[in-house]
Image (cartoon, rainbow, N blue to C red):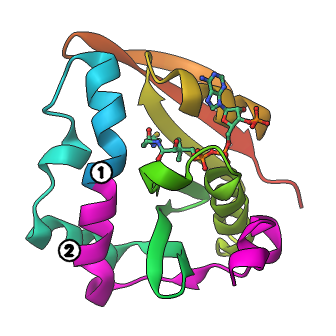
Amino acid sequence: MVGQLGHPRQVKPLRLGVADAGEVLTLQRAAYVSEARAHDDFDLPPLLETFAEAQAALESCLSWGFRENGRLLASVRLTVTGHVGLVTRLVVAPDRQGAGLGGGLLLAAEAAAPPEVTVFRLFTGSKSVGPLGMYAKHGYRETHRTPENNHELVHLEKARVP
Ligand SMILES: CC(C)(COP(=O)(O)OP(=O)(O)OC[C@H]1O[C@@H](n2cnc3c(N)ncnc32)[C@H](O)[C@@H]1OP(=O)(O)O)[C@@H](O)C(=O)NCCC(=O)NCCS
């Protein structure tokens, strides 16, 4: 499994659900500290999400993750509304970032999305240099910005390639 994760695009993502909420929340809080520091805002929604809210989210959306020897290394959520797939909460364990897991899971979630999805949307903070670079690398283009506390949210979109 370790070797396979060196090539994350070749690893099938695991579906995550309500039973994974505790691990997802722990991973999410660890991962988002860097974004909180970048934006000087420790009240980012991913850091404030409660266990009950995480359970409810995982009940209602699609979610996938990568595990290695049981440890959850990365997770992502996809909420489908009509033909739109909204990608949220893409996170990778801090000690495993920069090795392709985040991009690999993003592409895996796109591939696993229901057939009615023709466009993927997501948003990230304007000071999220790493995520903005990663999303651009994977074909996402900015559509607009909205104000958010002391920064902006950058909204991005990518058409699904049939
Ligand atoms: C964003 C996140 C999911 C990316 O996962 P990852 O496994 O580290 O990313 P990958 O290794 O797949 O991709 C790295 C790519 O990101 C981009 N990137 C990363 N840091 C960057 C930086 N400082 N400047 C520009 N681009 C950067 C590059 O395109 C890089 O590709 P390259 O290695 O070919 O140069 C992860 O860093 C994370 O969990 N961050 C905290 C939570 C978060 O911000 N999530 C996104 C919310 S919208």
Q: Secondary structure at mark 1?
A: helix
Percent of width and height locating residue 87: 51, 53
Q: Which amino acid type is shown beneath numbered disc 1? A: Ala
Which residue appears at 77% of the width and 41% of the height? Answer: 138
Q: Main SS type for the magenta part?
A: helix
Q: Which amino acid type is shown beneath numbered disc 2? A: Ala
61 versus 141 height, above or below: below
Percent of width and height locating residue 94: 44, 49
Horizontal side of residue 155 vs 40, given as left or right: right
Q: Residue under circle 1?
A: 30
Position of the N terminus by quadrant: bottom right
Label at residue 55: none
77 versus 153 height, above or below: below
Residue 156 or residue 131, whichever sits in front: 131
Q: Residue under circle 2?
A: 56
- The stretch of residues the image draws in magenta is 1-28
Position of the C terminus by quadrant: bottom right
Horizontal side of residue 110 vs 31, given as left or right: right
Q: Which quarter of the picture shows residue 77?
A: bottom left
Which of discs 1 and 2 lies nearer the camera? The answer is: 1
Give whichever of discs 1 and 2 has the lower sequence position.
1
